[in-house]
Image (tube, grey):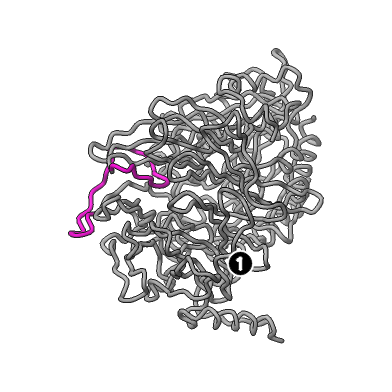
Amino acid sequence: MNLRHAILSAALLLALPTFAHAERGFDVRDLAKMDRYSSPTLSPNARKLVFAKRVVDFDANKASTSLWIEDLFARDAAPPVRLTPEGWNVNSPAFSPDGTTVYFLSAKNGSSQLYAQLVAGGTPKQLTAFALDVDGYKLSPDGKQVALVFSTFPQCASDLECAKKQLDADGKKKTSGVVFDRMFIRHWDTWSDGRLNRVFVADLGGAAPAKTAVLVGGDVEGDIPSKPFGDLSDLAWAPDGKTLVFSARRSDREEPWSTNFDLYQVNADGTGAATNLTSGNPAWDAGPVFGKDGRTLYYRAMKRPGFEADRFALKSMDLASGNTREIAPQWDRSADGITVSADGRTIYTTAQDTGEHPLFAVDVESGGVTKLVGDGSVSAFELADTGPTGPTLVFARNSMKSGDQLFTGGIAGTPVRAITPSAGEMLADVAWGEYEQFDFKGWSGDTVHGYVVKPWNYVAGQKYPVAFLIHGGPQGSFGDGWSYRWNPQTYAGQGYAVVMIDFHGSTGYGQAFTDAISQHWGDRPLEDLQKGWKAALAKYDFLDAEKACALGASYGGFMVNWIAGNWNEPWKCLVNHDGVFDQRAMGYATEELWFTEWEQGGTPYDVPRNYEKFNPVNHVDEWRVPMLVVHGQLDYRIPVEQGIATFTALQRRGIESKFLYFPDENHWVLKPQNSVLWHDTVNGWLKQHIGP
């Protein structure tokens, strides 16, 4: 890292985005090759900060991650230094309770295991040597034990060697057929082999790496954490280290259409049965966190079974009585997680909010909510109540002009200062597209918000072709944040203006706004998109209404297919990435059935009319606009046949079209060189139809 950048003041950082000498726009190759910063981790005394730095080897089409450390109170004399050795690829840092050691996972020796690195330096020490990969871990409060996650076979119970032998035997089979008797047969991008994520507890501190551990919660047959994107924020140690609480959904026949996660309390020594703490709630309970005294459990809870985008409310439970209460019932936002202050008076959490993703402080007693950090999207944070100068906050924040940048400050009146460089500092010759939020009256007269991004080479009085981006989810948002897949700056960097509308169904505008899209995929959001496009054209005279393309992925891809037959007048071209073509087929072929069944109001056989009401396949006769279709073979959320069917319809109708197929990508395009190919193909399609 450049030392000058490492010691820049917050005031200077605010001046950086002007880039008086910038010569070019942002390019996908910049996006693919940029360093990424994440995992801010504070030492117990709040003096040391450890973070992860990801570096891409573009030629090798892979990335590696190292850990760096900084003394927060000696910045000028001691910029961040690398903590883990060269050649190590690591993840998941955590400090020991005494702050002398940093733990992390690495597959340096061929298997993912737990390691420890002294803050003072030296060679990492291997702490575990299990037969299976350690997929996740969480230290006990005293650091003497560790909860470990292994992907293992239920029939092997606590015998990890048994699971390893089963995997080896499966790898030597001369047959390839597999018999299933229940779903999930596949999930996200992986076919099931019968394994579940299970939690074990091992002792630390031995002279040799730990090789034995006890299974906890063995009577709860489910993935802990959940697949495919769960993490150990769903597991908590009690302050005394004797019990743990985790969130799990049982892996039974009903799992593919259930969102009923419950909180279970288990003994850390593996004895006794698990206690279901939230059996009274048939919806989703998540994110347990113990209060300091161990008598109160904080967590997040939804109310409606089967709805994955319901509001996550903040809850507290008295463990002795089982009584619960909602902490901030009037706060109409969905909390992402829970960090409790040492005195138990405040919960810190992030949440989507009107096109941003700020950090909030919630008063536990009154439910009052205060925004601490805004101006973009806070993706991670850590807070220490004690420190040389009082409470210490570190956080990662991104925006439409930078990926995650790490900061300290922003609490108790402390100034915000940068620890790592912004995208603008790493790419000093790049000019960014300026952007602003606007609003208009959409469906039902509700206020709807959107963003407009100017091209990097904007000149007043000129008109620019437009990329009209439609977000997925559909319960999501194209807000003031950074994306490595759908980044508006990659379009602004090619000389396009960008328009993005947070239609009904988007998150961060209240739960009723989010709810409005369910069973209304094709009418309410379409009305918002139409009115938003009209409002943007009226407000921003640099948008060229005669040169515009609409692009979207997932639900956005569905909407591209839908507008192809229901609102194709404004568009010179369309781009559909992993979009739904046939709602009925989607209802039978996707893996997480709770999603389609909630969104359509039931199963395809119970309410077939709902699946046909907004079904793009029924409007192919109205298609006329050239379309680029993109799909990945490993996409089991919206299977590749949906993309193939779209392309077939276009070709059979004689409409100009192309199909970009990735045999090795899932619902997302993740490999660096594949990402470049994706962007080059999409940009080439735009240039062909609306010009450079």
Q: Which residues are magenta?
A: 318-343
> In this orientation, does residue 509 appear?
no
Please tell me which residue is depicted at 32% across the width and 33% down the height of the picture: 369
Residue in the image at 33% along x and 68% along y: 266
Is 101 or 588 nearer to us in this picture? 101
Residue 144's spot in the image, x, y percent? 42, 63
Q: Nearer the viewer, residue 236 or 473?
A: 236
- Out of 561 and 684, give the one closest to the viewer: 684
User: In the figure, is residue 292 to the left or right of 547?
Assistant: left
Q: Which residue is mark 1?
A: 190
Label 1 environment density (alpha carbons within 10 Å; few <14, some 14–19, many ≥20): few
Image quadrant where one finds the N terminus: top right
Q: Give the answer, above or below, for where 85 lies relative to 68.
A: below
**SS at circle 1:** strand
> In the figure, is residue 266 to the left or right of 149?
left
Q: Is residue 287 left or right of residue 168?
A: left
Question: In the image, 49: left or right of 142?
Answer: right
The image quarter in which residue 490 lies: top right
- Residue 498 vertical position relative to residue 574 in the rendered view, above or below: above
